[in-house]
Amino acid sequence: MNLTEIIDFLSEITQICNMLNTKKSLAFLMACLLLFVNCNRGAKVIAKEAERPLNIILLIGDGMGLAQISAASFIYGGLTLDQLTDLGFIKTSSANDYITDSAAGATAFSTGEKSYNGAIGVGMDTMPLISILELAEKNGLSSGLISTCSITHATPASFFAHQANREMHQEIAQDFYNKNIDFVASTGKPYFDLNKLIQNGYAIQTGKSSGNMDALKKQFWFYNDSIHPPKANERGAWLNDATRLGIKHLANNKKGFFLMVEGSQIDWGGHDTDFNYTISELRDFDLAIKTAIDFAKKDGHTLVIVTADHETGGLTLDAGTLSPRSIQHHYASAHHSGIMVPIYAFGPGASLFRGTHENTDVFKFMKLLFNFK
């Protein structure tokens, strides 16, 4: 019995108990617990109150596989990721294809359901699925989204929008107005009605620097006026700054927060089969990871999760030199691959992420740890 099955098993027990009278419920529950203990000795499944995070920061390195991490760690002399000891693997397939796209991959993370490639927060029937961000809002937590691409792009969109196709950027932007997301740092400005954002209570900033942020207002920070930002070597420390400021802004809510941070262009480097583009984006993403980990260490109530929706390019590291550090490599294709990707965790509940999991388990574990109904 894997962790997903155990969570579903416990949920079913609860439902049955609610249907029985008190004495029968207690007897049935005791029998199930004995079975559970005998079948899963030593398994850390039920999150104790002391192990529940107040905040969760989910960082998604789009297209980030083990080869990309290995290469960046070697070339740059180490990464923050190297220091994390709770880790496992994620199976990435979508509902209709062995090779997932970012929309289906992010929908699995955000909703706990596998869907078809291109789906934005909807199931196989194109009906909306509630996301972890929406559950956070429903439970009084603050929420935030940060991405090095348009906020209407597949990964960030899957956390707030419900559309049948990832290319429906205008419709995805329309879904944003119905949410109450507290902090956004991204691009995609042409898709939005700025007056409508202001009417929805947003303070809007545009530019590489954030300026002064009003802690009492929701924030929408556009990197530029375009649909996408430039590469990491032109952005500077923007992603790291956005992560730091986003955490600071969301932490004002004593009930907690959920924040998703995407390193989008690791994937684009893979599609371009551009090794330097890939690893420079990964290094940039790792700086944001460090900011999240540093906050979690100081805060003590924050779970940081780092993973990828899929690997891009089938990157292979063939040979290299130690001095100077260099790697001979090749890409198998300019597309996504089906290889499992790593998942790292730090903070309360991190041990849940050890082992091999389906991509849908990320949502299920976050929901369990947040104790959302």
Image: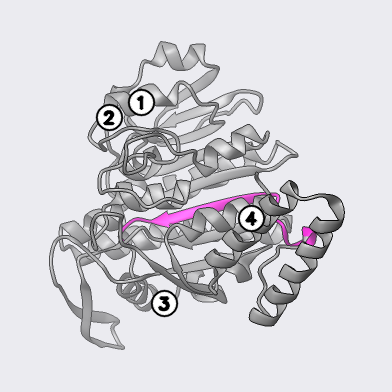
Q: Is residue 260 above or below residue 344?
A: above
Instruction: Give the Cα separation between the discs numbered 4 and 2.
Output: 36 Å
Magenta range is 49-63
Q: Quadrant of residue 216?
A: top right
**Marks 4 and 2, the one that precedes in the sequence:** 4
Instruction: Give the Cα separation between the discs numbered 1 and 4.
Output: 35 Å
Residue 114 lies in the magenta-colored region = no
Horizontal and vertical percent position of residue 253: 71, 36
* Residue that badge 4 annotates: 11
Name the amino acid, label 2: His
**Marks 3 and 4, the one that precedes in the sequence:** 4
Horizontal side of residue 236 vs 227, given as left or right: right
- Kindly indicate whether the residue at mark 2 contacts the one at mark 3 (C-beta within 8 angstroms): no
* Residue that badge 1 annotates: 173
**Marks 1 and 4, the one that precedes in the sequence:** 4
Instruction: Give the Cα separation between the discs numbered 1 and 2.
Output: 6 Å
Horizontal and vertical percent position of residue 183: 53, 33
- Image quadrant holding the N terminus, namely bottom right
Instruction: Give the Cα separation between the discs numbered 3 and 4.
Output: 45 Å
Q: Residue at image x 34%, y 71%?
A: 340
Q: Is residue 190 above or below residue 359?
A: above
